[in-house]
Amino acid sequence: MIRFLLGLLGAAGGLYIASLYENSSIALLGCTHMFLMALSFFYILYEMESVRITLDMPPVMADQGESVHIRLRVKRRYRGCCGIIRVQVAVVRKDLRSATRHKWLRMESGLESADCFLSIAEPGSYEILLRRVRVYDLTGLFCLEQRRAVRGERASLGVLPRIYPMGISLSEAVRGFVGEAEMYDSVRSGTDASETLQLRPFRDGDELRNIHWKLSAKEGELIVRENSMPKGCAVSVLVESVAVGGEAMLQCVASLSFCLMDRECPHYVAWYNDGLQDIVRVRVDNEESFYEAQLRLLREGGAKGKTDIVARYREKYSGEPVLHRIYVGAGPCFRMDDRETLRFKSSSLERELGGVELTL
């Protein structure tokens, strides 16, 4: 709109000069200028009624600092519309509700899509929004801006924190921890008769009560039902608010959880959810559940105030057996059970975590 106003001022200035000097050529030039600007204005209005911009980007997950591919598509209701279009893309962090970056993308005339790559330095849960669109005339000099063509276009993006290696030693008590769980060990047998690990031929030392008599009669030999062993979680990782702890704390949580998973130690990651006004926890056994826990923590772990997560967790799960509770707080820091708190420097977090040796 500002360019139109400047153009109108230029045309008006030309007409004024023409009236002063009584010059018909300058007057004709000013009138032509006004006519072309009016034509340009109505052309842009026609374009704006035709254009609809969509964000072609499913919910994605990216590592910290990794480039994320964004594609915009333009749909035109009427034929013959081929002006240049510029779209503003904004990246908004959900827990802060403020735009961390915005970028204008240029969609050339005649093209139906435009691509760009964004890299985000801080881990967190983000939204990719289309803020506004500028539609230009065929000369590319004049434009009008609106939001209606991109209203409601958004996509979710989870940026995971960096993972640093750290030393973890597991005791036999942790490795053989049973507890109550809905997941079972795929290798070791146990005493839970509700789940069968495998059916195998009878061996010396097997108990008669474990013989599968119907299958034995069918196979013509004694077949034993081997019961499964529940895989309980001996370790719970309790996380302070993401908004309070910041980037370094998230890196500590991700590194600790990943290393526990890598050592085949099932564990819970728990935090306080403001919306539910309650403790939320996710069980981590493999890479899929690890990424699920990290994404949920980024989305839901931004409690506004500081909460005593350890006391709330003990209260909610007081009747559930657990061997170790590891608190991860701002600073960042670790505190396992009633042991001394380990504090780290954010500037040298990779080196300091590499020197840690947790014995569970």
Image (tube, rainbow, N blue to C red):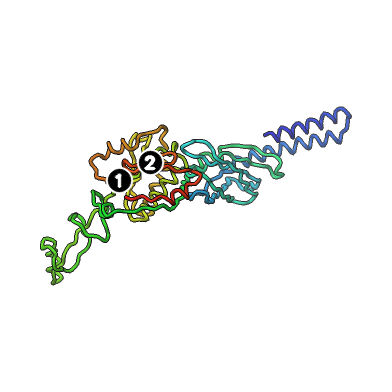
Query: How far across and how far down the image is residue 288, in percent?
Result: 38, 53
Give the quarter of the image for residue 311.
Answer: top left
Does residue 289 appear anywhere in the picture? yes
Q: Is residue 158 above or below residue 223?
A: above
Rendered residue at 54%/39% (across/down): 100
Label 2 crowd bin: few (<14), some (14–19), many (20+), radius 10 Å? some
Give the quarter of the image for residue 3.
Answer: top right
The residue under label 1 is which amino acid type?
Answer: His
Mark number, residue 324: 1
Q: Relative to the observer, which residue lies in front, 121 or 198?
A: 121
Of the numbered discs 1 and 2, the one sitting upstream in the chain is 1
Rendered residue at 87%/27% (across/down): 20
Residue 323 appears left or right of 136: left
Does residue 68 appear anywhere in the picture? no
SS label for mark 1: strand
Residue 125 appears left or right of 116: left
Q: Quadrant of the N terminus?
A: top right
Q: Which residue is mark 2?
A: 341
Q: Residue furthest left?
A: 208
- Separation of disc 1 and disc 2 at Cα? 14 Å
Q: Residue furthest bottom?
A: 220
Query: How far across and how far down the image is residue 201, in percent?
Result: 17, 69
The residue under label 2 is which amino acid type?
Answer: Thr
Q: Is residue 331 above or below residue 165?
A: above
Label 1 crowd bin: few (<14), some (14–19), many (20+), radius 10 Å? some
